[in-house]
Amino acid sequence: MLVGLPGVRDWQEALYRDLHQHPELSHREERTAGIVAARLAESGFQVHEGVGGTGVVGILRNGEGPGVLLRADMDALPVGENTGLPYASAVPGVMHACGHDVHVACLLGAAELFARATQSWRGTLVALFQPAEEVGDGARGMVDDGLAELVGRLDVALAQHVLPAPAGWVGTRRGPVLTAADSIRVTVHGRGGHGSMPQATVDPVVLAAMIVIRLQTIVSREVGATDAVVLTVGSIQAGTKSNVISDHAVLELNLRTYDPSVRTAVLDAIRRIVVAECQASDSPRPPEFEFYDSFPLTVNDAAVTDRVEAAFGEYFGDRAQTMPAGSASEDFGDIPTALGIPYSYWGFGGVDEQAYRAAVEAGRIGADIPVNHSPRFAPLIQPTLDTGTQALVVAALNWL
């Protein structure tokens, strides 16, 4: 089957450049979805569009046998591109800063390879193209829109992500591989007034500052040393003018955890600290908490991952390694969980190997090697597309 890889490479590379140049934000992936649906139909898949909004599901049935779901996410980010590429984003303030365009191109390539070589496998292949991964509700949207009834009984779900690692590298990991994530919008209330008369006010800026400082003690003083937790205050918004004390401030927090009990404890601590600081500042109203962009914990099934790891080792040789656990988050797990099937999620590299090694030695990953969500994130086209396509095919053939 993989002998046919050069046959998809030309259109796949052109498609990738086109997707990169025309990124679409979460829940707005109409153009991308149309391209995906047309390509799947050309390859002979039964195509279902509009699943969960802009999601696309392609089904290729090839006799009796296991069912495998391969998933790619499609959405871009509200990030202005700064790569200087000739195929850089043509959409101001929007780019594929996380590599979902790579994922789409790889899965379309793998789908065509399976369609061309039906004599080499048996079963059902589901190619699922998911919207809105970046906001954490795209997978649930597809599930809620009847995905289980659409695809029928399957045996396994597989997914991957391009990473700032050497191109050609693939990495697997058993057990927890990505954190659960919670975003929290906290509104605290003060009493506004003139900047020259702070004694007549309750200053929400000072209140917010005290909350930020106190939140730093949660990880350092309330979480065990072996429990991985990341707590970030990513935004504080308050006031309109230097001599006006506002009547409220809004803080946006992001929490990443690997353990459900630790997650609960940290969320309780956040609430306790915010409420206590508001009381200490004599806030006239209780604080408000809004939870959004929630992601599940990604936990790779051990047996499934062992099969994928063995297949990768045989095919990729020493390019197949162990992927380190990450503090990023992903909603892919909502799909196999709802379908009642095990899953595995792996990473593959997209960075020039020599540049990567030099950056590691200099301790400058992130500075010299742009990471996901950076305005400079730009995976090498090759061998990245080849590797991602091969990884999907090799993994799926374990079952098919």
Image (cartoon, rainbow, N blue to C red):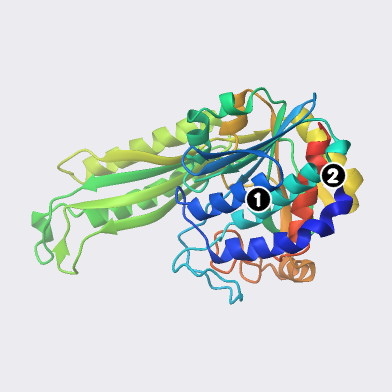
Q: Residue at x 52, y 56 (%)?
A: 76
**Left or right of 332, for residue 120:** right
Place of residue 271 in the rendered image (x, y in percent of width and height, measured from the top left): 35, 36
Towards the viewer: 238 or 50: 50
- According to the image, label 2 marks what residue? 312
Q: Residues within 10 Å of mark 2 (few under 14, many from 20)?
A: many
Which residue type does callout 1 highlight? Answer: Arg
Q: Residue at x 68, y 48 (%)?
A: 42
Residue 164 in which image quadrant:
bottom right
- Compared to 150, does 237 lie above or below? below
Query: Mark 2 or mark 1, which is nearer the start of the sequence?
Result: 1
Towards the viewer: 385 or 214: 385
Secondary structure of the residue carrying numbered label 2: helix
Place of residue 18 in the rendered image (x, y in percent of width and height, measured from the top left): 60, 64
Which residue type does callout 2 highlight? Answer: Phe
Place of residue 400 in the rendered image (x, y in percent of width and height, measured from the top left): 81, 32
**Left or right of 251, for residue 371:** right
- According to the image, label 1 marks what residue? 39
- Give the CA distance from mark 1 to mark 2: 27 Å
